[in-house]
Image: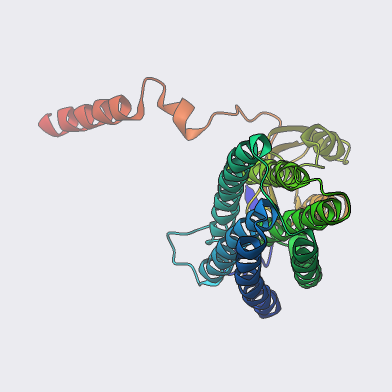
Amino acid sequence: MTTASPSHSHADHQHGGGATQRRLALVLALTFIYMIAEAVGGWLTGSLALLADAGHMLSDVAALSLALFAIWVASRRSGPRWTYGRGRAEILAALAQGVALVAVALLIIFEARERLGQPQHVAGLGVMAIAAGGLGINLIALWLLQAGRRESLNVRGAWLHVMSDALGSVGAVASGALIFFFGWQWADPVASIAIAALVLASAWMLMRDAVDVLMEAAPRGLDPDEILASLCALGDVENVHDLHVWSLDGGQVALSCHIVVQRNESNTPLLSRIYQLLGERYGIGHATVQFEPPDFSGENPQSLCGGGCENSLDTETAHAEGRHAH
């Protein structure tokens, strides 16, 4: 008997409410406006750190636009073909954001290396003022996205973009101060390399988590062996096998397993205890459990075919034709 957790539909699940979308849209507008300001400021002051920060803001604009689009795709009602809904559109968006972050970081490092050999004059006071304004915009954006990042890997990707950009603004402010007070022109390319390192760290974490979801790895913080032991410890459970734990979209956690029960009476009370255990202790919102009697052979449709389903079907057809001939 196969039983699934009640009152849950993958197709009907909605990602990112209207509030999250409005916040993303506001952050997108603020980021775009100040990206232009930083690009102009970097050109006027000759600061690579500001231009790097503006380039990072450009990747933020792309990431936020992609995040909004992915939320729209995920929120669309799915047809019968999309049995898990379209939630993984947000995971694909998060992976794309990570790749974009890597590209931005590598471009910054390449340009900074050139400037280390030939430092250029930079207006330190202008760099400090413009970078401080960018930092203020980043802090507002981080506050707006704070709640949504816990619910969606996609929004978390956008939040990481903005966070690394905020750290980049701090680096730009510091480089401007060193140039203005001490005349250290080399501080600008060094700050740029530090910004790039932060960007790469953010990209690595984001891509790692996105790949985990796409490869259906057990979510970090959940130990499948511990879940297996907890299920086996329940009364009337003789054995648990074929246990799988994965994340549907970076937020929802799903589980499927086969449970060998000690008797063939109604398993409804046991099923209730299983759902309560999985939901309360491990936060698993969707579980599919198959009960099996102790003497069940464990054969599945594929193993029953033996030498192959096609061969078995051909043999059965030949026997049927032979019976008709007689």
* Residue situated in front as seen by the camera: 84 or 5: 84
Q: Which residue is rendered at x = 20% and y = 27% of the image?
A: 318
Position of residue 284 in the picture relative to residue 247 (left or right):
right
The image shows residue 40 at horizontal and vertical percentages of 60, 68
Q: Quadrant of residue 56?
A: bottom right
Q: Quadrant of residue 27?
A: bottom right
Residue 291, visible in the rendered structure:
no
Residue 18, visible in the rendered structure:
yes
Count of marks placed on residues: 0
Position of 153 relative to 303 (above/below): below
Position of 92 relative to 142 (above/below): above
The scheme the figure's colours follow is rainbow
* Residue situated in front as seen by the camera: 82 or 60: 60
Q: Which residue is rendered at x = 66% and y = 66% of the image?
A: 41
Q: Quadrant of residue 90?
A: bottom right
* Residue situated in front as seen by the camera: 247 or 202: 202
Q: Residue furthest left?
A: 325
The image shows residue 150 at horizontal and vertical percentages of 78, 60
Position of residue 20 in the picture relative to residue 129 (left or right):
left
Image quadrant containing the C terminus: top left
Q: Which residue is rendered at x = 24% and y = 28% of the image?
A: 314
Position of 306 relative to 249 (above/below): above
Q: Which residue is rendered at x = 87% and y = 41% of the image?
A: 234
The image shows residue 201 at horizontal and vertical percentages of 73, 42
The image shows residue 313 at horizontal and vertical percentages of 29, 31
